[in-house]
Amino acid sequence: MSQKRPTPSGLPAGVEGFGAAEQALHQAASAAAGGLDDFGDPSYLEGLRVLLDAYQHEAKFSNTGRQMAWQGLVQPLRARLRSQHLIRQNPSVLETEIHRPLVVTGLVRTGSTALHHLLGQDPDIQVLEYWLSVNPQPRPPRDEWEVHPDYQACVAELEAMYAADPSLKAIHFMSADGPEECRHFLSQGFTDDAFEVNASVPTYTQWYEAKNIRDTYLRHRDLLKLVGSTSPEKRWILKYPVHMKNLGALFEVYPDACIVQTHRDPTKVMSSYVSLIAGFRALFEEDIDREAIAREQLEVWATGAEHAIEVRRRGDESSFFDLHFQEFMGDPVGSVKRFYERFDLELSEEGEKRLRAWQQGNPQGKHGRHEHSFDEAGISRGEVLERFAAYMDYFDLKPE
């Protein structure tokens, strides 16, 4: 008589591993969503299955990391269920127009997070707040947020993450009511960088980086319409470096998108990003290999930059505004005014006042200094410059 294999530490009882967990994950998500069972377009299953196989055979999870990874799969499935339910209840939200969304993207670690938080102070536009990216729903009035269970859960989640590793706040600061990247929307399709950031999953990375994620952006658009249905008059400003790697798919779904592409010397970018990934991955895995991370991500982002160049060569350059790191750091509000003018946005007197107040109250390093070096990354500046040569040449970038 065969004996049942023990459940790996960190997984729910009866789940023998990620490889055979698809049904259990859907059941867990349904239970967490109050019994809902409509996950919408099944195209997300391809990415989920590739990821589960990589989690089973490649990831080096600690017991705690395995538990966190499980929750990191249940959460987007639960979000799919809840957002799908809201859309089915009120399908008219999909009639909400999204006109010329302004999308901030570019290489990682180029000042785009600071820019995004600055833009979030403009009362005349709308950004995707963290708690609504995790729990897509029509945006309630601001004075109702603090008592909302979804908002409170996000506050607790972020507090727990920063308590586990306080240095992460200096690397990438997030708040429940602040602007958030589009990563949670992309995660609903299991097509997002977060999965390869948090774990060693080379087969998933290979699949994901080569995938046209148009279906994910169609879902992204529906979720934006849902969240923005209570403020349809406001123009969207979105931010996520990952959009640069997927510009082709993004323009298929948002053909009138206005792109602010941020730039910086990639040698400054890569050592910082490797440090960020190592910090997040240490929450999930043991035996962090910084050199493996560096070489994988060097190829990922250099290829993504080249993809963006090809999209720009085929498209309309009037859809783009290039913002260099030093330009933004030297004059943040002036930089915003320049690309607002380019894309027919108006910064009101009140908006400029709020942006300047935020700038003064949030100097660089407010949440600590992020220390990083190539000695830790395991790759040299010369290797980075060589791999990014095409990108630097196209945008006439010089090493800092």
Image (cartoon, rainbow, N blue to C red):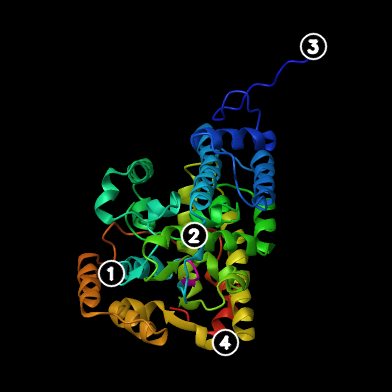
Give the quadrant of residue 300: bottom right
Amino acid type for the residue under numbered disc 3: Met
Foreground label between 2 and 3: 2
N-terminal of the two: label 2 or label 3?
3
**Residue 84 location, x and y as percent?**
54, 49
The residue stretch that appears in magenta: 104-108
Q: Position of residue 289 (x, y in %)?
A: 56, 49
Which corner quadrant holds the N terminus? top right
Q: Nearer the viewer, residue 274 or 303?
A: 303
Q: Are marks 3 and 1 in contact (CB under 8 Å)?
A: no
Label 4 is placed on what type of residue? Asp
* Residue matched to label 4: 316
Counting residues from the start of the chain, the first of labels 1 and 2 encountered is 2
- Residue at point 28%, 69% (across, down): 123
Q: Please state, as top left, top right, bottom left or bottom right, where the C terminus lies in the image.
A: bottom left
Q: Residue at x 64, y 21 (%)?
A: 6
Find disc 2 in the rendering and name its residue: 92
Q: CA distance from mark 2 to mark 3?
A: 57 Å
> Looking at numbered disc 1 in the image, what kind of residue is underneath it?
Pro
User: Who comes first in sequence, dot 2 or dot 4?
Assistant: 2
Q: Residues within 10 Å of mark 3 (few under 14, many from 20)?
A: few
Residue 105 belongs to the span the image colors magenta: yes
Q: What residue did someone put label 3 on?
A: 1
Whole-number angstrom distance, CA of label 4 to CA of label 1: 29 Å
Q: Which residue is denoted by mark 1 in the rendering?
A: 123
Mark seen at residue 272: none
Q: Nearer the viewer, mark 4 or mark 3?
A: 4
Q: Residues within 10 Å of mark 4 (few under 14, many from 20)?
A: few
In the image, what residue occupies the spot 56% across and 63% down? 379
